Amino acid sequence: MENEKMISFEELEIGQKFKPHEFTMTKDTIFKYAEAVSDSNPLYCDEENGKNSFYGSIIAPPTSAAIYIISAFQSEGKIPPGAAVHTRQKFEFIKPVFPGDQLVTSVTVKNKFVKMERKYVFFEMTTVNQNGEPVVNSEITVFWTQ
């Protein structure tokens, strides 16, 4: 197993931008995600229904954004297991994601601070599709345990 760089609280800098993370949404990913969260909405699971819908295709469940947003943190290295606990997360869903969409997520360290001897990092993420159109904005605050 190759050695992967671990990200530490100390090396994160306010304003730091991670390398953009690319992700292709597939039908298989949509189907598996919907199944994993027990969401049988026909817009996610039934291609015929999707084709006849307003969208003209199945779409990804909005919360599947967690797949590509969390993966975006790995563009700079791994957060050590158990080192970061989500304390707050916010999503703004702007546009639906379709099978075949090429998504790019950018991560920025918006703030980091110590409060009551606890370390916190506030990240902001933006994901755009292959046309440069925003599909989701997200914010995550983590409590850094190490």
Image: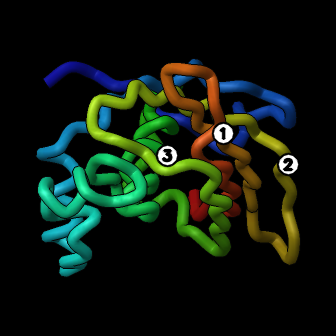
| Residue 126's disc number | 1
Q: Quadrant of the N terminus?
A: top left
Residue in front for this viewpoint, 86 or 31: 31
Residue in front for this viewpoint, 22 or 143: 22
Number of callouts? 3
Residue at the image point whose x is 32% and y is 47% from the top:
56
Which dot, 1 or 2, sits closer to the camera? 1
Residue at the image point whose x is 48% and y is 50% from the top:
96
Q: Position of residue 59 (x, y in %)?
A: 33, 53
Q: Position of residue 79 (x, y in %)?
A: 47, 44
Q: Secondary structure at mark 3?
A: helix
Residue at the image point whose x is 19% and y is 80% from the top:
38
What distance separates the C-alpha of mark 2 from that of mark 3? 18 Å
Instruction: Return the disc, 1 or 3, that comes first in the chain's sequence.
Output: 3
> Label 3, on which residue?
69
> Label 2, on which residue?
111
Residue in front for this viewpoint, 44 or 57: 57
Residue in front for this viewpoint, 95 or 62: 95
**Callout 1: 10 Å neighbours few (<14), some, many (20+)?**
some
